[in-house]
Every structure is written in C-alpha cells, then in structure tokens.
Amino acid sequence: MEPLNYFDNAATSFPKPKECGDEVLRYLNTVGGPYGRSFYDRALEVSRTVEDCRELTAAEIGAADADRLIFTSNATHAINIVLKGLNLEGREVWISALEHNAVTRPLKFLEDKGLLRIKILPSKAGGLVDTEALSKTDLSGAGLVVVCHVSNVTGLIQPVADIKRAIYNTGAAVPLMIDAAQSAGHLEIRTDQWDIDYAAFTGHKGLLGPTGTGGLYIKDPSVLEPLINGGTGSRSDSWETPGFLPDRFEAGTPNIAGLFGLAGALKNKPVPRHSREDFLSLLDAVKALCGISVYAAPDAGLQSEVFSITAESAQVSPSDVGMKLYRDYGIETRLGLHCAPLAHRTIGTFPEGTVRISVSPYHSPGDFERLLNALENTASTIRA
Ligand code: PMP
C-alpha cells in the first residue's frame, strides 16, 4: 500500500472511492443528457441517478424524506440559502463560538445592512456549547440558532440533540441549523431524530464525493425563500418559481457529473483502514510530544478525526511547523486560520492559527506511525 501523506481531508477528501471518478466519467463520456427535463432514456437515466443520489444522501444524514433534501454547490451555498432565505429581519441569530466563515460572513453581511444581530451561544472552554446555560438564555428575540456540528479546527463534536432540547426548554420556538460540513460522512447524523430544522453539508469532504456538490435538508420549506430563481423544467408556463421541492431551490442545471460521482462514492464507501482506537492512540501520542501543543475536543467522546497543533515556542510559527512537515517528510496539512477566525479566537490561537491534521478512512495505522515520527522529529528540532 502506498504511503498516504495527505492529512488535509477537512479541506477536501483524498483519495475518493474509484467509483466516484468512474461515475463522473460515465456521465460525461457515455450517458450525457439533462436532468428532470426530458422523456428519452438517456435523460431518464440521469434523473434516476440524481434521485438515487438524493436518497443515498438523505439516508446518510438520517432524513427519511429525501424530497426535503435539495442539492447545492457546497455547504457555503446551502448555508446562504437559509441565512438569506429566512425572514430574519430585526431578529437575533445565535451562533456557536466555533463557526466557520461560511456562517459568519453571510451573517456579518446581513448585520451590516441592519437586518439582524449576531449573538454568541454560551459556551465552555474550547467552544463547547453550554447547554445548561443555553436552556436559561432569553431567546425571545432569536430567529435562528446555528451550530457547527464538528469544528474544522479542533474536531469538537457539538451535542446538537442536547442543544435542540435546550432551545426548546427556553420556551422560544427557534429553528436550529447545523453546519454538517465536517460531520457528514464522518459521524452518524440523525436529522429526523434530533429534530434538526436545517442541515447544510458538502459532498467533497467526508462523503468522499466530487467538489461542487453539497446539499441542504429543509424541514419546513414553506418559511424559506429561494436564493436564486430560474428554469426548473417544471411549470414552465409560469413566471413564478414552483413552490414544491426540490424545484423551488434547484433552479438551473445542477452539477449532474458531480452527483453521479457522489452517488458512486456513497455506494462504494471504503472500509476504514484504521480503527477509532488507532486514531485516538495517535492523538494521545501527539499530545504526549514535548514542544507541541494540541487543540482538540475536551474528551474522546466528543472528538472527530481532525485536530490542530502549534509549537509551544512562540518563536516557531504554524507555517514553520507545517512547511517543515511538508519539506522534510512530505506530510500535507493546512496552516493558518482555516476560514474560522472566530474558532481560533475561541481557542486562543488567533491570529497565527494552527497546523491542522485531518484524517481519511484510507489512512492506515502505518500512515499514522509515519505522521507521528515526522511530528516527533519536528518537535525535537523545534526544541533544539
Ligand atoms: N463549514 C465548515 C465547518 C467547513 O469546514 C467548511 C469547509 N472548510 C465549510 C463550512 C464550507 O464548505 P464548502 O467549502 O464545501 O462550502
């Protein structure tokens, strides 16, 4: 087995199941044709595959009704549909202290227009939402709560079911959106069971699909305006956008090649080459290294397979560490703020950021061993 030195899976996953690329090419080179717009066999095969992909994706996030899942270009697009499509005028939007710019930037854009106010949910050290404090928070002015399900910086898994319950206990009926960009494909998401109102996700990370794919689960479509309007292949006689899903939120030709690839990936998920214990042992071993600080979840039960490190010495920057890991050992990581300055402020690593290590199911215990050796050697040169 080839060594796998790519530890930047939180940016986008690599490798993908072979069938992902095969299916993209099958659409481009063999099947062809439009989605949802024609009657001939080629077009029907496209529609079947896209709807198949919808069912597979809905199952992946624990949503029984695939009709409430719409495809988008990525998680950012899905999040924007909710933040700009809900009527949040004059309302507060409460977010966790670990949100990504995909959430904070559209909200800041709307706040600067005087449309809403951003508030931060009560949290414990490391950004874990404090559900007890939340249940006593006054949410009477809130229009939405947004929580990053898994932090793309520390891998902290937020207890979204408890958060939903805490919101309910405040007595205010406030919908909850989860940003599942880093959780879809990595952990079990129970959208229906947890009573999630909006689940935004991307296809190219944990779901192991192509870039340019993503989606949004919408519990109650009647309260959401579409972000874009246009041709859907349905009700073409009318100037009005159809009210039914998915057409209401899927104007324009979708990324058919990408959705073929995503379906191919979801039907051929790899058996992970490492166990949960292998990952947790790696994390423990990195924590034990002298000269390196680790930023991770407060306990293993809340830890997804991504974490951050810095050198303990303030003289050594994340880019010094990351460049050394790459130049000397070929280890590919992501340096800096990871589009999550709020999260870095929360964990105390702003403005330099960290070196982020994010794992793939294709990593073997041998890959972890090579990473650990590289980190050990890097730590000892930093100390010297
Ligand atoms: N939220 C989080 C937590 C992320 O890590 C990312 C990707 N870095 C996004 C949202 C945005 O995902 P995409 O780039 O696929 O829109």
Image (spheres, rainbow, N blue to C red):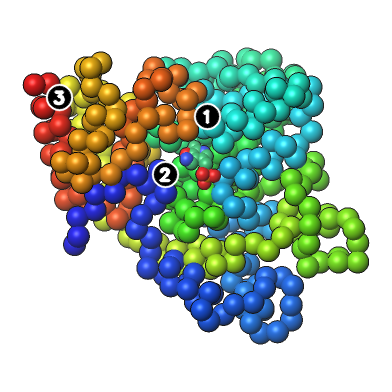
Disc 1 marks a residue whose amino acid type is Glu
Write down the quadrant of residue 86 in the picture.
top right
The residue carrying mark 3 has its beta carbon less than 8 Å from ligand 1: no
Question: Which residue position holds label 2?
Answer: 11
* Residue 88 location (% of width, % of height): 76, 29
Return the disc, 3 or 2, that comes first in the chain's sequence. 2
Return the disc, 1 or 3, that comes first in the chain's sequence. 1
Residue 302 visible in rendering: no
In the rendering, which numbered label is found on residue 99?
1
187 vs 165: above or below: below
The residue carrying mark 1 has its beta carbon less than 8 Å from ligand 1: yes
What kind of element bears circle 3? helix
Between residues 301 and 254, which one lies in front from this camera angle? Answer: 254
Left or right: 114 as drawn, with respect to 214: right
Residue appearing at x 20%, y 49% in the figure = 367
The residue carrying mark 2 has its beta carbon less than 8 Å from ligand 1: yes
Disc 2 marks a residue whose amino acid type is Ala
In the rendering, which numbered label is found on residue 382?
3
